[in-house]
Image (cartoon, rainbow, N blue to C red):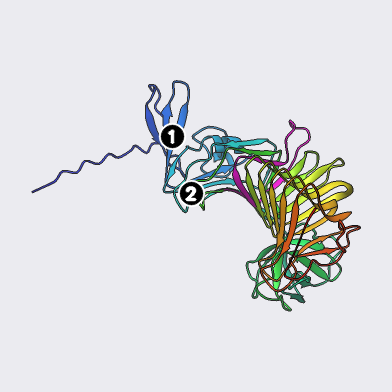
Amino acid sequence: MSVLISTRVLPSLQDFPVNPYIGQTFVHNPGGRSIQYEWDGTNWQPTLGYGDITTYVDPAGTDDLDHGFAIGADAFLTIQFAWDMLPPIVRGGSIDINLSDDVFTENLTITQQPVLSQGEHLYINGAAMTVDAALVATGGVQGAGAVPPNVLGVFVVGVYDNLLIRFTSGANNGEIRVIGQTTITNLYLVGAALPAAPVNLDTYDILSWSTTIDGYIHVRGCYHNNDAGQMNFVSIAITYNVSLPAAYGTVYANQSSVGFAYCDIVNNGSTAAVHSDVNNYLNCWRCVIRITGAAWQAGAWAEWRSQIDLLQCRVVGTDVVNHIGFLVQMHSGGALDNCEVTGCIHGAQIETNSVLNTFSLTTITSFIHGNGRGVQVVNHSMACFTVVSVTYGVLLDGNADINTVADTSAEAASFSWLN
């Protein structure tokens, strides 16, 4: 007995039909992606993606559906177009939007995140550039307690502050960290303890960002459908452009879930560098968050039942009268894990029924120092200094005033207060 199996093979052509009818579908495969479109009478609308979608954006590119498959002239022109052409559903694949080593002067509005299969990812990827290569350490410290991981050598004070270090040999090979402070003899790193103490002749590179979004990013209504599906921006410098229309922050997220990794996020005129608003979750991993404007501004701001987690990040203000490092308010939550906050009127301000956790998953503290006040807690809120390990969860040092708490380390094991 024989069985006839009928299999429908979708077309995989590059050229769209010339005279489509309303409702006609077509699978477009120009390279790097296979997306089904439907003609709505005016435009081809993406409806479904098959497998991985990889696109490229470059100032030399063109915003049409036949581009986006390589860097240069074959790329899309704008990040916004690269986002808008994504289908609402992607079966069995991840999404990577790769940005060239350039400055993109545009405001980016992101809505309607595609639904991905379990275990897939959605990344908008920038690139790093090497500032100094093959530098050689003379030693270093793995990091523990109130002593951050650091690299020994001979340096110019401040020259590598707020950049990235990438170890290229030894036990720490491949590790990438944010650099906090550069002294004559030490590069102090932000974050958890290194896998091992750097030793003499270990090599490393100093990295900066070669991809910049000169504008704001607004994310609205983008919840991911599984644990691995959160949208992430990776290795991008994001600078609020005061000449473009006003924003709620350099990065503003509303009723969404979004992450940033190894990014440099600068607020120089908006309300906050990263702003999480209304039932929103936002996390930053090994990012530099800088406040450079002259008026009241925040580094990270969570409000209206939202959450911001800062993990191994450096928050830097430049005005101890107007800048707030981390503002948590209106029934919201915030977390500082192995972070550094400095240069603000308040390192952290917690108000209106909100909670801040400053915790450590390793033996390294979070450092809140060089602010007008380390932590201010008001209006029925709470700051909790907790730790999983045997040392302090936070080190308050070098602040002018700590809201009735002595300007020293928090209590061992755990400490909290309610005001």
- Asked if the stretch drawn in magenta spans residue 259, the answer is yes
Q: Position of residue 250 (x, y in %)?
A: 72, 41
Q: Left or right? Give the position of 111 relative to 381.
A: left
Residue 285 picture quarter: bottom right
Q: Is residue 3 shown in magenta?
A: no
Q: In whole angstroms, how far apart are the C-alphas of marks 1 and 2? A: 16 Å
**Residue 156, placed above or below residue 371:** below
Residue 213 to residue 144: above or below: above
Residue drawn where x is 80% and y is 42% of the image: 268
Q: Amino acid at mark 2?
A: Ser
Q: Amino acid at mark 1?
A: Thr
Sequence-first disc among 1 and 2: 1
Q: Nearer the viewer, residue 128 or 140?
A: 140
Residue identified by numbered label 1:
47
Residue 331 locus on image (x, y percent): 69, 45
What stretch of residues is rendered in magenta?
A: 231-260
Q: Is residue 367 visible?
A: yes
Element type at mark 1:
strand
Q: Are marks 1 and 2 in contact (CB under 8 Å)?
A: no
Q: Which mark is residue 94?
A: 2
Residue furthest to the bottom in view is 200
Residue occupying the point 78% across, 70% down: 146
152, 217: nearer the viewer: 217
Is 94 on the left or on the right of 317, as rendered?
left
Query: Foreground: 115 or 86?
Result: 115
Check disc 2 and report its element: helix, strand or loop.
loop
